Amino acid sequence: MQKTATAGNDGKSVKSDCSVQIKLTESGGISVNLKSKVEKYFGKMIIKLCKDELKFFGIQNAEVEIIDSASLDYVIMARIESAVKKLIKTDKEYLPSNEMRFKETKKNRLRRSRLYLPGNSPKLMMNAGLHNADGIILDLEDSVAPSKKDEAKILVRNALIKSNFYDSEKMVRINQLPAGLDDLKYIAPYNVNLILIPKCETAKQVIEVENKITEILDEKNLKKQIWFMPIIESALGVVNSYKIASASENVVALAIGLEDYTADIGTGRTQDGTESFFARSQIMNSAKACGIQAIGSVFSDVNDSDGLRKYVESEKALGFTGIGCIHPRQIPIIHNAFAPSKDEIKKAKIIIDAFKDAKKRGLGVVSIGSKMIDPPVVKRAEQTIKMSKNK
């Protein structure tokens, strides 16, 4: 049995995190050596938290070293639990108090922007909700080193329970299947709204995620709505995109990941997107055919605001309703670029008013000039007004 284990991060560049080392001993009880920037104010509380958590896991004798850079309690709890689970085999979870009421989100809510946050970096989670992204993604996949995957699951679980992301939809990108199925037990029972399924290539993968979530929730006697956003990142995924989009009623959007897609087809990603035009069109068409949202790839140059705006405008023209982002400064640009123009808003109001008037008079359709206005046209106009109010 391993006698010593560590978890977390420390160093000059680390903020709002901690490292924990636990060494099991034969006797002596629990001794805690704490080095913290906030020891004067919270030292006793941190030591008590550590002892209470070790007692919860049945550890009676251990030497613990905690190097803390002003981390929140749920971060410390996650790091201690991660170290413990490297030492002993246990399915028990030491959960923070759940102060955030779970709020379900609507299937057709706005998803113009989704901000990726590395799942093992607590400092980026603390104030993420203040950036007003439509969605906050706690990422367990590409942004987390393989050696830190298990630690990230526990930290993300605690962040879902404890962090206030305000009006942003709480999203988690799990690992590529089949490994991602194990992530779900740390995610599904807690305050998550949407699961991103990376590198999705078949409808079967969506069903596997759905079945696993159902199994987990049934075991805990929970009922909740969790949406899916498969990410298409390969040629095979593009070909199967309609089957993926229609695999479950819980699929609310299809996203495309262009970095992996272009690598899969053996080319590079360009600004004009010629190499991915077919894939993007196919993803958009498959999504629209199923009545769900089409979400574009991230724009990776965080310093190119003009390039980002042009990119969003081109994706909007193709039929996409949102893209991913990797920096908060991209969010207002994305929202503004997806917002309808004054002329579009004016036309939408005219259409809605004309249709309401026609409905009062018992008419199913009405014309404005030479154009017939029927329910699908009104639906687009209503979406335009909705977008204008969420600029």
Image (tube, rainbow, N blue to C red):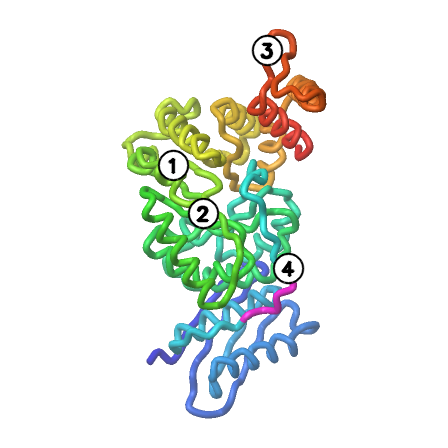
> Callout 1, which amino acid?
Glu
Distance Cα–Cα, label 3 vs label 2: 40 Å
Task: Give the mark nearer the N terminus: 4 vs 3.
Answer: 4
The circle on residue 196 is 2
Q: Residue at x 40, y 39 (%)?
A: 245
Q: 358 above or below 21? A: above
Task: Give the mark nearer the N terminus: 2 vs 1.
Answer: 2
Name the secondary structure under disc 1.
helix
The circle on residue 259 is 1
Q: Position of residue 11 (x, y in %)?
A: 51, 61
Distance Cα–Cα, label 1 vs label 4: 36 Å
Asked whether the residues under the numbered discs 1 and 4 touch, taking CB atoms below 8 Å apart as contact, a structural biologist would say no
Residue matched to label 4: 101
Name the secondary structure under disc 4.
loop
Task: Give the mark nearer the N terminus: 2 vs 4.
Answer: 4
Label 3 vs label 2, nearer the camera: 3
Q: Which residue is drawn at 44% across and 38% down?
A: 255
Label 4 vs label 3, nearer the camera: 3
